[in-house]
Image (spheres, rainbow, N blue to C red):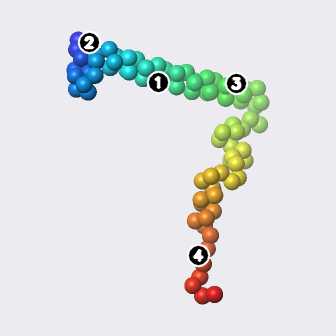
Amino acid sequence: MRARVFSDIAAEYGVNRKTTRRRLDAAELVDAERARRSAAKRAEEKRMKRLLGPDYRNPERAPEHLPRFASTAGSAAIRLRRPMSSRT
């Protein structure tokens, strides 16, 4: 049954059934790696909280650790400038 689904998808896109299977396997591997990395990141943050206690602040989330002049902040600063008046 499952091979038939891959054959139908392959026929729809005009590729070989094996190509479809390899692409879907690769996508599953990417999803699994992404899940593994986010789980490791959560575990590391939990470990740091346990080690440092209430003083721990995640640098990725804490506003004092964010760069003051990021590329988006520069464009925001330009938008906040007062327009030049027509009277000079």
Mark 4–mark 1 contact, CB under 8 Å?
Answer: no
Residue 52 percent location from the top left of the image: 77, 30
Q: Residues within 10 Å of mark 4 (few under 14, many from 20)?
A: few
Q: Nearer the viewer, mark 2 or mark 1?
A: 2
Secondary element at image label 2:
helix
Q: Residues within 10 Å of mark 2 (few under 14, many from 20)?
A: few
Q: Quadrant of the N terminus?
A: top left
The answer to whether residue 49 is left or right of residue 35 is right
Tell me which corner region of the image, top left, top right, bottom left or bottom right, holds residue 60: top right
Q: Amino acid at mark 4?
A: Pro
Residue 20 percent location from the top left of the image: 32, 20
Q: CA distance from mark 4 to mark 1?
A: 48 Å
The answer to whether residue 73 is left or right of residue 32 is right
For the question of whether residue 5 can be seen, the reply is no
Give the mark, 3 or 4, whose residue is nearer the N terminus.
Answer: 3
Give the mark, 2 or 1, whose residue is nearer the N terminus.
Answer: 2
Q: CA distance from mark 3 to mark 1?
A: 24 Å
According to the picture, the residue beneath numbered tag 2 turns out to be 3
